[in-house]
Amino acid sequence: MLKRIISVSLAVLFAAVCFGCTTPVNNNTDPTAAPAEGDTVSYLNERGKTCAISLHTLNEGLLSSSEYNARYSEVNNMFAVTMAKAMANNKTCVYSPLSLQIALQILANGADEATAAKLLDSICPGLTRADVNASTARLIDTFLSAKGVNINSAFVANCGYRVSEKFANIAADYYRASVGALDFSNPNKALKEINNWVYQNTDGLISELLDHLDRETVIVILNALTLDLNWAIPFKPQSATTPFHGVSGTKDVNMISVTDKFDYGKFDEGEMVIIPYEGGEYCMAVILPKEGVAPADAAVKLIGRQNECSSTSVSLQMPRVEITSKIDVLAMASDLGISEGLKGDFSEMLNGDDFSITTIMQGAKLIVNEKGTKAAAATAIVGSKGISLLNGDVFMLCDRPYAMVIYQVETGAVLFVSTVGDAA
């Protein structure tokens, strides 16, 4: 059984902890009233106060760490392709399909059956809610069992609302999510707390993910994914500059290079070489499209096809990269196929209180150099009462727009996708 590690990060996130907030309250009842039979008081708070909601776990256990449906890897790749298509007009960007997918999955667990079915059908087609939850729990366990990748989630409720025990259990036990409350009557203070959580959980790579919250905010769902990995075979910095022919013109840049045996494939859309990170749990697929093929289009065709590559002596040169992106996911909801699933009923999250999804934002940063790769992504879903929107057999020189895909080897789950239109 996967044992959830209870952390103290929530106390850091929600700095203002109130005293005497052990009496639960329903929005429609007197704050001093005793809880109804069957109510759980461990994570409920007094209305109008800001306090941390206790983390908890079910002793009987909801999941097994061995429960992983291979279909989940397939749908993760499918969603990565969908997102790559939606992001095709962004010439240089980085994003995390997995971070967005997990945040949407947490949201689906607070929806009624019809809404959850629509939302999951767009991001995890062919899988039930139980399949998705158990498989994600196993995937998170895989990430946390090795060094280099970390994943955190949080569910923040307006302290004037009462969180569903069923939803809180799922968020905590399957997604290891911190569950907390904030007083959104002071939206600027709440915004600072939310962005501070993002900053702390992305190793300082992402700050100010959200730029606005209001008094009508009901919930915020957060996911943060970080990666800090060294190459299995370090690259060497090149002293001489090489022209990089980007979408905005040609620029002389310093390349990094490596020569060794790597898995390599040549496809109709271009070339792909698989570069492993130290430990072998993760790899980067570097994709160099054919002339005339956009990096995003090549990535769409080649994501998930790394097993078609074979060991070849490869010399790879590519620029150092530092990319920061901020994406309004709600604005591209139709392209992602998630619009209908975001319009439904999420009242099961808050014991009958419904709301609209008014903001979905993702921030991401990618740093690639001769030592390895650092990356972070953070996704926020906001629900409110408002209105919702080198000398080998093969020489591969990335001196023009190209793409990179970072995935987990065992499952094939795609963590990050990046297209590089211009060198830094």
Image (tube, grey):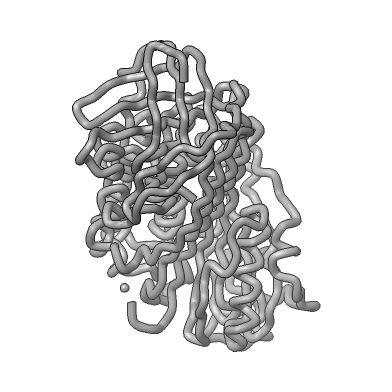
Residue 208 x %, y %: 57, 69
Asked which quadrant contains residue 353, the reply is bottom left
Which residue is at 24% across, 56% downward?
337
Q: Residue furthest front?
A: 240
Which residue is at 23% across, 62% downward?
334
Q: Nearer the viewer, residue 423 or 344?
A: 423
Residue 134 x %, y %: 46, 39
Asked which quadrant contains residue 360, the reply is bottom left
Residue 10 x %, y %: 70, 61
Horizontal side, residue 354 vs residue 28: left or right: left
Which residue is at 50% across, 85% downward?
214
Q: Nearer the viewer, residue 297 or 394?
A: 394
Horizontal side, residue 405 vs residue 300: left or right: right
- In this rendering, the answer to whether 263 lies above or below 157 is above
Residue 58 x %, y %: 62, 47
Would residue 105 be seen by someone viewing this image from the given angle? no
- In this rendering, the answer to whether 274 lies above or below 41 is above
Q: Quadrant of the N terminus?
A: top right
